[in-house]
Image (tube, rainbow, N blue to C red):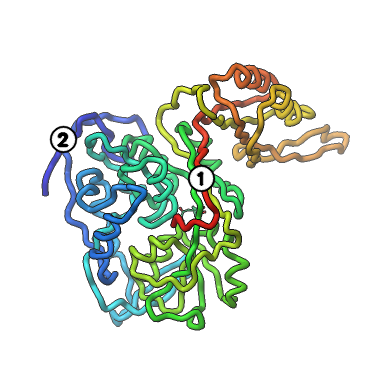
Amino acid sequence: MSSITPSKPILKSLSYLDTTPKLLSIPWKIHRQTKRSQICNIRAIYKQESRNFSAGVVSNRADWQTSCAILASNVVLQQSDKKTDGSGNAEIVSINGVHRTLDLVPVQQETNLPKPLSITDLSPAPMHGSQLRVAYQGVPGAYSEAAAGKAYPNCVAIPCDQFEVAFQAVGHWIADRAVLPVENSLGGSIHRNYDLLLRHNLHIVGEVQLPVHHCLLALPGVRKEDLNRVISHPQALSQCESTLTKLGLNVAREAVDDTAGAAEFIATHNLRDTAAIASSRAAELYGLQILADGIQDDSSNVTRFVMLAREPIIPRTDRPFKTSIVFAHDEGMSVLFKVLAAFAFRNISLTKIESRPYKNRPIRVVGDASTGGTAKHFEYMFYIDFEASMADPRSQKALSEVQEFTSFLRVLGSYPMDMTPWSPSSRDL
Ligand SMILES: O=C(O)C(=O)C[C@]1(C(=O)O)C=C[C@@H](O)C=C1
């Protein structure tokens, strides 16, 4: 047990954070050595992995321990929470609320992978050096971790068990940035994340486009004919749907929180009838074999991530910038048309438009009930990305016009566009 003193005041626990924040300057309670069991040779794999990971995300155990105390206690808790079948030979687990009885894995080894941060772990983290801490949803080997590495080489990547936690980690100074997948070229928008962008007060400060190369992973020795189930993130399942069918895998699909988490789950529970859709890095990390490589339905499979920070960046005009806005309008005809026209007349290209239900006010009644002429309309929030910087006078004029016929307008961020070329055939992950 060691202790360090944070250089900045930090918030102590979620209960403080949710009410009036109390700033504390307390010595750090630091980690117990956590033990994650069950995956063969994971330490060796992970050490090699840390050396190999070309994107440069710093995620080895030593760095991790000095950078993030938040993960410390979870594993022991998790192990004691396991339910057994009474004989002690099997464990009852739940995937998406479905309970399954699994044989317990005989091999019990300590591993070095960081445990994802969860909502109960949002206690103070030490401030450390110059390395940027980037929160992502998932476990090591998730595409979001790769996106963090692409956006910020040499960052410390912090796994979080939910997107909400990644947002809060930044809001409470546990992380400096969060990376958030927002859309995929095959699966479309990741809607929930649009809602989170609105609910939280973080700013979009950048974007990265990551070619996503999926593999079908299973335990060593398992053949395709042995499979009864394929598990993965819902986006990954939808990105590989036709290929799975072509491979003759007309088996159950089950959604889990992230792709690498699916691989970890198979390894941890020794599931010989289940395959995961995940990255080749996840295969290495969790000791799985690649049954099929490049199983996305289209080789041009790209996911766009945005990076979020507590403060906006200063927009510039010396390189291509994108701006993301969200707006709502009360009523009135042609508002959407007028908004689009405000950009079109100034030759500003839109790259994205998305509508989401306006959650506090989902339905509007129009007309006069006494005359029987009522109709109900859904209310929406509209998200627009356009190709111009907020420092560009054209954007400012367009937005002041948009403001005139909208009831709510927020600039989510103005940030450099990801212009890096990518090759559809390259196997980035
Ligand atoms: O599960 C992961 O590995 C993620 O990073 C999430 C996610 C997503 O939300 O779309 C990211 C990229 C891929 O499109 C598939 C899944």
**Disc 1 marks which amino acid?**
Gln
Q: In which quarter of the image is residue 376?
A: top right
Q: Which of 278 and 380 is in front in this view?
A: 278
Q: Is mark 1 on a helix, strand or loop?
A: strand
Residue under numbered circle 1: 209
In this view, the mark in front (2 or 1): 1
Query: What residue is at 40 percent from the left and 30 percent from the top?
Result: 310
The furthest residue to the right? 371
Is 326 located above or below residue 285 in the figure? above
Compared to residue 366, the image places residue 135 above or below, namely below
Disc assigned to residue 5? 2
Q: Which mark is residue 197?
A: none
Residue at disc 2, secondary structure: loop
Amino acid type at mark 2: Thr
Is the C-beta of the residue carrying label 1 under 8 Å from the nearest atom of ligand 1? no
Give me the C-alpha separation between circle 2 and circle 1: 37 Å
* Residue at left offset 60%, top offset 32%: 326
Categorize mark 1 by other alpha carbons within 10 Å: few (<14), some (14-19), many (20+): many
Instruction: State the residue at coordinates (46%, 72%).
Output: 275
Is residue 18 among what the camera can see? no
* Residue 427: x %, y % from top left: 47, 58
Task: Pick whichever of labels 2 and 1 is earlier in the sequence.
Answer: 2
Kindly indicate whether the residue at mark 1 contacts the one at mark 2 (C-beta within 8 angstroms): no
For the C terminus, give its image quadrant.
bottom left
Q: Where is residue 8 in the image (x, y as percent from the top left)?
A: 23, 29
Please indicate whether residue 369 sits to the left or right of residue 13 in the image. Answer: right
